[in-house]
Image (cartoon, helix red, strand yellow):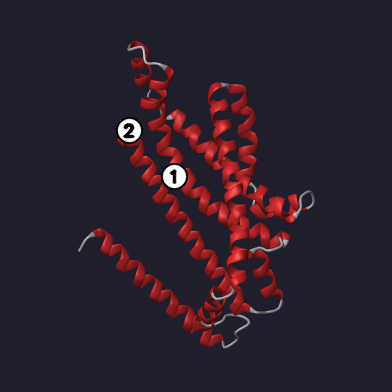
């Protein structure tokens, strides 16, 4: 049996075990507004899937996440390049990055809620979660570049483009690709949290908040299940795209 098949079997058995624990706990409590059963949650989930609004609302949330990730990634790349070239900029950026990474996301959401509207707040929170990861990983990538290779490139008279393609880019890619994968998952979760707290209109977070206030716990669990599944799907698609990008880059 291959390692991949073993992982699939262990994952399936683990999932079945936790579903069993969930089902037993729901029957012991016997209070749906505290903990709905697996069956009730799946029933609500499949009701969502046949509702047109489910896809429209999820799309709005997804678009905000993508926008936040694109802005955060672009900002992280630009500031990482500038920080690498100019030491004062590195020290200027490092302090806010440290503060952002050390501050609970809920605190940022509440503070920004005073200043920004729902949609802008949600996008900005995603930017704040993504930007430090991209910046820090790229700075680590720059630090990992072999100085002897850099000296060799000078001896052989490499052009800037050749030096970047053969020495800098491979080092950065090792850190940039994991940063993107982490950012996608974290950005999605940050977006949902911001939507719930800020009660953003036409959002998954708004649906979760409405269901909670109306004590529709099975619906809360169903929306949460959709959040988890979309998170897995987004990270999987990101890994696939980055893998193709990486292979394509090697083939050139």
Residue at image coords 61%, 65%: 56
Estimate the x, y position of residue 200 in percent, counting from the top left: 71, 60
- Residue at point 49%, 38% (across, down): 137
Q: Position of residue 82 (x, y in %)?
A: 57, 26
Dividing the image into 4 quarters, which one contains the C terminus?
top left
Secondary element under disc 1, as helix, strand or loop, is helix
Location of mark 1 (residue): 178
The residue at the point 53 percent across, 68 percent down is: 226
Q: Residue furthest right?
A: 114
Q: How many marks?
A: 2
Label ID, residue 167: none
Q: Work out whether mark 2 precedes mark 1 in sequence or the reverse, and give the earlier one.
A: 1
- Above or below 92: residue 216: below
> Residue 213, relative to residue 131: is it above or below?
below
For label 2, the residue is 252
- Disc 2 secondary structure class: loop
Q: Nearer the viewer, mark 2 or mark 1?
A: 2
Q: How far apart, in angstroms, are the residues tagged by discs 2 and 1?
A: 22 Å
């Amino acid at each position: 049996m291959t390692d991949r098949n073993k992982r699939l079997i262990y994952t399936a058995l683990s999932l079945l075990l936790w579903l069993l624990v969930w089902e037993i706990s729901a029957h012991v409590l016997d209070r749906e507004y505290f903990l709905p059963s697996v069956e009730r949650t799946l029933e609500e989930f499949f009701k969502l899937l046949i509702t047109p609004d489910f896809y429209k609302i999820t799309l709005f949330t997804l678009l905000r996440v993508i926008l936040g990730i694109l802005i955060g990634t672009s900002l992280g790349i630009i500031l990482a390049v500038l920080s690498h070239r100019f030491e004062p900029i590195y020290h200027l950026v490092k302090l806010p990055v440290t503060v952002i990474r050390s501050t609970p996301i809920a605190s940022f959401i509440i503070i920004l809620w005073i200043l920004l509207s729902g949609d802008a707040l949600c996008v900005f929170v995603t930017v704040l979660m993504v930007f430090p990861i991209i910046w820090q990983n790229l700075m680590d990538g720059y630090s990992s570049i072999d100085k002897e290779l850099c000296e060799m490139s000078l001896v052989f008279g490499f052009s800037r483009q050749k030096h970047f393609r053969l020495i800098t880019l491979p080092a950065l890619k090792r850190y940039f690709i994991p940063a993107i994968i982490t950012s996608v998952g974290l950005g999605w979760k940050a977006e949902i949290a911001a939507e719930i707290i800020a009660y953003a209109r036409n959002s998954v977070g708004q649906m979760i908040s409405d269901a909670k206030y109306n004590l529709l716990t099975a619906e809360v669990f169903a929306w949460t299940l959709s959040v988890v599944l979309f998170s897995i799907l987004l990270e999987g698609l990101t890994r696939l795209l980055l893998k193709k990008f990486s292979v394509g880059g090697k083939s050139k």
